[in-house]
């Protein structure tokens, strides 16, 4: 009996030794230098029901600190394809290495394709490939993606995969572009109750730029930039999607206001300027922060549903070109003036979403869902069609904080005297 147990124990031991290498999971490994890593995937409108695929492929050899290399940092190729998935095999007619989407950082779509009714069919290819992560951003370009990637030449960041990460991260913090991810495109589209926003970018600048009173009332391409061999790429504003298709754009100011109203979007510290109520020829700058959530009350009873929104904002007043030192009385006047200015802009944006876009991008449908017993009742209510006829009341509560490091300013007349 003991011999049988010994043999069984020996058999189990040998079996474990034999199977251990198979459990290591290294049989299908592919070394880094045998793969071509697509860091940006571009989609353009093609011919004969095809799309034009553009790959921005990073060179992993370029990042190695072993010495100077003659190899380029990245490569851009464009070719026609039927879909995103089969395009990987097609690209191997040109690229020697195995194409992979494992390092894909951004999906870039041209405005022409995004406005096509068939666009949503190609987007759902993304959900089929396990290598494409849904937490990556989607960018819409004014021109063809091929043109955008070839003209986009950042000077301070040669690692192209890091460039898109940094530029979107900081433009999101400034509120100039929305921070929606790819999974939001699908969830918002399938819910059929709201608008999806994507960062808007271009390398095509309007000659001379566009003059605006505010610093953020611009769309990508309208900001005048001068410099020695400066990069022409601009990320500013939003592309607006309804039911999976692009229907318009929002400038930087409208994008910021949308972020203020939408609790699902993280808001950083936003710097903006407003007209000085005591010296209208000047504007003062403020650092805007949100420390409390918006108070949204939705009443769906009655003939006309109503939405009452109260937006709390905390502001630090920074540059004051009128050189005024505000006492308590003037601070109250300033507070009322800012509340009135912001309220007017928010009301104007809401009116535009109701009349032009026929949908809202503020996440209010998520709050309204709680008013219904079942999802079927909510779908029957048809939030998208009902929203344009709703009465929306918005109010702003501004809390004035500090006046910068030096709150008291000298009397300009005495200084000049």
Image: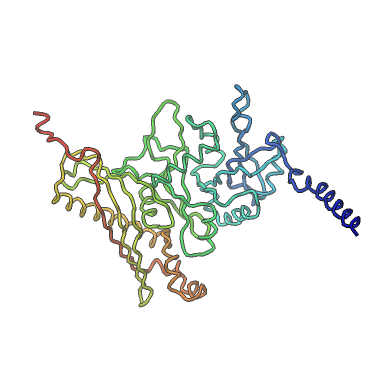
Q: Position of residue 246 (x, y in %)?
A: 49, 54
Horizontal placement of 250 versus 334: left or right?
right
Residue placed furthest toward the bottom: 302
Residue 164 drawn above or below residue 302 = above
Q: In this rendering, does residue 268 appear at all?
A: yes
Residue placed furthest toward the front: 2
Q: Position of residue 218 (x, y in %)?
A: 37, 44
Q: In this rendering, does residue 48 appear at all?
A: no
Residue drawn 68% across the image and 41% down it: 99
Q: Report the number of numbered marks.
A: 0
**Quadrant for the C terminus in the image:** top left
Q: Position of residue 131 (x, y in %)?
A: 64, 48
Residue drawn 47% across the image and 43% down it: 168
Judging depth in this view, the residue of 78 and 124 nearest the camera is: 124
- Quarter assignment of residue 123: bottom right
Residue drawn 54% across the image and 48% down it: 136
Residue 116 drawn above or below residue 75 = below
Q: Position of residue 377 (x, y in %)?
A: 49, 75
**Quadrant for the N terminus in the image:** bottom right
Horizontal placement of 43 versus 365: left or right?
right
Residue placed furthest toward the top: 68
Looking at the image, what colour scheme do you see? rainbow
Horizontal placement of 395 versus 18: left or right?
left
Horizontal placement of 359 versus 55: left or right?
left
Residue drawn 68% across the image and 44% down it: 88
């Amino acid at each position: 009996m003991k011999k049988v147990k010994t043999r069984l124990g020996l058999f189990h031991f040998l079996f474990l030794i034999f199977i251990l290498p198979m459990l290591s999971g290294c049989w299908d490994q592919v070394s880094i230098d045998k793969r071509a890593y697509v860091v940006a995937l571009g989609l353009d409108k093609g011919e004969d029901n095809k799309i034009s695929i553009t790959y921005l492929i990073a060179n992993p050899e370029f990042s190695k600190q072993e010495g100077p290399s003659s190899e380029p940092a990245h490569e851009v190729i464009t070719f026609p394809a039927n879909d995103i998935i089969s395009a990987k095999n097609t690209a191997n007619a040109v690229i020697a290495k195995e194409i992979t989407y494992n390092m894909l950082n951004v999906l870039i779509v041209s405005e022409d394709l995004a406005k096509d009714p068939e666009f949503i069919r190609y987007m759902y290819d993304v959900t089929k490939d396990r290598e494409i992560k849904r937490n990556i951003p989607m960018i819409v370009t004014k021109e063809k993606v091929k043109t955008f990637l070839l003209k986009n030449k950042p000077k301070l960041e040669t690692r192209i995969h890091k460039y898109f990460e940094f530029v979107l991260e900081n433009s999101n913090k400034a509120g100039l572009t929305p921070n929606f991810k790819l999974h939001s495109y699908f969830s918002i589209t399938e819910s059929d109750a709201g608008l999806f926003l994507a960062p808007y970018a271009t390398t095509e600048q309007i000659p001379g730029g566009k003059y605006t009173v505010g610093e953020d009332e611009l769309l990508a391409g309208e900001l005048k930039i001068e410099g020695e061999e400066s990069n022409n790429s601009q990320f500013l504003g939003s592309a607006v999607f309804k039911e999976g298709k692009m229907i318009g754009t929002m400038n930087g100011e409208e994008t910021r206001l949308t972020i203020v109203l939408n609790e699902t979007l993280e808001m950083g510290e936003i710097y903006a300027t407003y007209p000085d109520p005591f010296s209208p020829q000047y504007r003062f700058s403020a650092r805007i922060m949100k420390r409390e959530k918006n108070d949204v009350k939705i009443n769906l009873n009655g003939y006309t549903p109503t939405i009452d929104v109260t937006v709390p904002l905390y502001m630090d007043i920074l540059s004051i070109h009128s050189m005024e030192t505000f006492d308590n009385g003037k601070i109250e006047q300033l507070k009322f003036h800012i509340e009135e200015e912001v309220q007017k802009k928010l009301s104007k944006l809401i009116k535009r979403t109701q009349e032009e876009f026929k949908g809202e991008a503020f996440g209010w449908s998520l709050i309204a869902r709680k008013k219904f017993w079942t999802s079927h009742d909510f779908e029957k209510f048809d939030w998208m069609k009902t929203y344009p006829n709703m009465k929306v009341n918005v109010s702003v509560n501004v809390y004035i904080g500090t006046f910068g490091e030096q709150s008291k300013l000298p009397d300009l007349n005495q200084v000049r005297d």
